[in-house]
Amino acid sequence: MGPGDVCLIQTIAILYLSSAAAPLLAQNPAVEPPATGPRAPVITDTEFNGAIPSLDDAPLESIEAWQADQENRAADGSVAQRTGQNPADPAISTVQDNDAVKLLPDPPVTDLQLDDPLPPIENFDTEPPPEPTQAAEREVGAVRYILRMDGLDAAATAELAKDADGIAVEAAAWNDVRSRFYDLSSLKEKGGRADSRAEIGQRARADRQLLLDILNGQGFFDADVQVKIETSATQGGPVNVVLTVLPGRRYYLGQIAFAAPAVQPADLISGYFAPKTGEAIVADVILAAEAKLSVQLPQNGYPFANVGQRDILLDSGTGMGDYTLPVDPGARSYFGQLRTEGTATFDASHVAILRRFKTGDLYDSRKVDDLRAALIATGLLSTVSVEAVPGEGVAPDGTPYADLRVRQEAAPPRSLAASAGYGTGQGFRAEGSWTHRNLFPPEGALRVAALLGTKEQAASIAFDRANAGRRDRNIEISLSALHSNFDAFEAYTGRLAMTMALVSTPIWQKKFTWSMGAEILGTSEDAFELARGARDRRVYYVGALPVQVGFDRSNDLLDPVRGYRVNLRVSPEASLGTGKQIYARAILDGSYYYPVQDNIVVAARARVGTIAGISRDNLAPSRRFYGGGGGSVRGFGYQRLGPLDPKYDPIGGRSVNEIALEGRYRFGNFGVVGFVDAGQAYESSIPKFDDWRVGVGIGGRFYTNFGPIRLDLATPLNRRPGDSRFSVYVSIGQAF
């Protein structure tokens, strides 16, 4: 036991005597000590010695043991709690050594704002708040306020007077500060109402910091903002919240330096950095320039480039800031090998078919992004990533390779699809299909489809190889059976076809597309013969070699608003039904789209077709030209345009011409379309461009992420017997 322990014991003893003496004096407060002579002892020596703890050499208990003992004592309760006595009762004149010390709990937290730092003295609101009425206290948002910002107009005027050449620049800066602040202001957002003046002050402090950040972002690093909250002069009037801007001077870029090794070309870094010496230090401009460097370096052969943290050294004397940016470009690299990881749906050889670069080409991150999109477009991967990693070896010129690591996880290969539509003359149509997209890897799909409609029923099975030997080249072999029952003819048709095509996809809309193929079909068809004046059923066997080319300069595959398209289809065919006859079918389509405004588009379409080398009666009715319907001349039923038989049923022709004009207005996800269509089919092989039939109408559009859903209502202006007064068309996609 050391000297400090003895002092502690003496202190305890003194406190003990003081607490023991208090109740004794309280019992007889009139007793006063004698004026002279020695004082009588308050307690005897025996009582004093008994109260002092033993001073033996036993070691003190540990802090942990003492804390545990105190917690146990507190759990058991004090003497007053156990006995039910009042601690202030004079009868309790002593405290037993086995009574627990009652620890006081922490005071409750009543106001979290007490923990906030005090605002600067110049921003302190010295006006006492008005006494709220009981009604105002009960009303939510009872305190109204008006926000005012001072100083910007005066600062702008000073800048204009100082430098006439910078008038437009400085005015734009202040306008940008003001507009950004009002867009993000907490005071502005709340509409001029708060529950209390304290809440107004809290919003004002947040807006002060916001305004400082915006000013700093415009190069005013010495700026300050003062806040003042003024009570209204009228009883119950709104509080005025005034933010006074003290912008200080604006800083401009001085020397611009890049801490980077030499790159190829030499101005690759500096050339893509837009800010120049003498321009204002604007945060958005600086950040955009740095982001552009991060993009341009990987696009120009540096896959491992890293842009570091900028340093701007401000000189308050000159108002200039020297800018330094560390850039680590990494190694300039060529494309190396492809590596695949994960649940591999495609091996490296098939991934190589999808890429638009070769090993040894200069690295370009845009081509890497394109490869990633191509892998996603297959629909066979749930997740995929493509990243550059250092490769092995170097090119003959000493440039290292950057390999591409492709991580892929397979997606479910099977899918179901369905669609439905309605058209006057065609009736209702519902189509469904089941597809296994990778039954024959890689990308060998098997598709089974069915069509059910009031006028058509069909079933088909097809094998489709996507990206066959090269990207976006598809090969399809199909077998189908079809029953059609229209006013023009009734047919039972079997068809075997093979097609190879370079196609557009929703991700890559190609400017130039083509397809070629072969088909053979046998069809039994019932049609009207003018020579006999009666309907007759005949069997036709047809072989064809269709070829199609397209040129597309529109901006969107499903919903174009600008550009144009041209498509030509030529099909040499041989008919074996009534002796061997060789003929050719050709159709030329064109469309044009012009945006009058952002939400108004004018669209136009024209079509002309011809069949040469065969008479109409020897031509299978299903191979003839007809006009009318949702994809032709709206207002007239499907196949209703062209020559008619005595019962006013269409019999088809060997030529056709059509034009259409639409005005499309879109608002949000909805749209309205007004249209005029015109056209005619002719018995001759050369279109006559006369006797046109015209239909007008209006349509509605509902725009979705897979294209617009359209509903068109049309009426013919020059009806013939058998034509409906109104026609309705429902389908997916624009009419053209």
Image: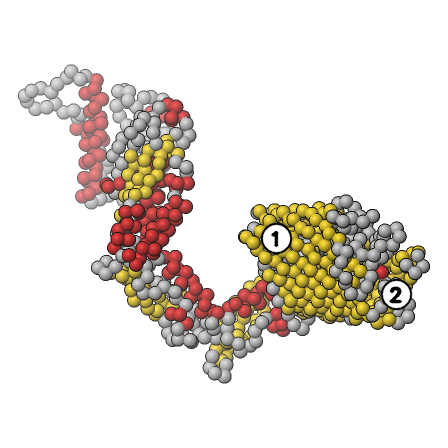
| Residue 422 visible in rendering | no
Q: What residue do we see at 90% from left, 59% from top?
A: 530
Q: Residue at x 57, y 65 (%)?
A: 372
Instruction: Specify the amino acid type for callout 2.
Output: Asn
Q: Position of residue 575 (x, y in %)?
A: 86, 69
Q: Residue at x 64, y 49 (%)?
A: 673
Of pointers 1 and 2, the one earlier in the residue sequence? 2
Disc 2 on helix, strand or loop? loop
Task: Specify the quadrant that holds the C terminus.
Answer: bottom right
Nearer to me, 223 or 66: 223
Q: Farthest left residue?
A: 36
Give the label on residue 618, or none: 2
Residue 553: image quadrant is: bottom right
Q: Residues within 10 Å of mark 1 (few under 14, many from 20)?
A: few
Dot label at residue 705: 1
Q: Going by the picture, which residue comes out furthest to the bottom?
A: 396
Above or below, 8 against 544 in this view is above
Residue in front for this viewpoint, 507 or 18:
507
Res. 668 in view: yes
* Quadrant in the picture for the N terminus: top left
Residue 383 as seen in the image, left or right of residue 614: left
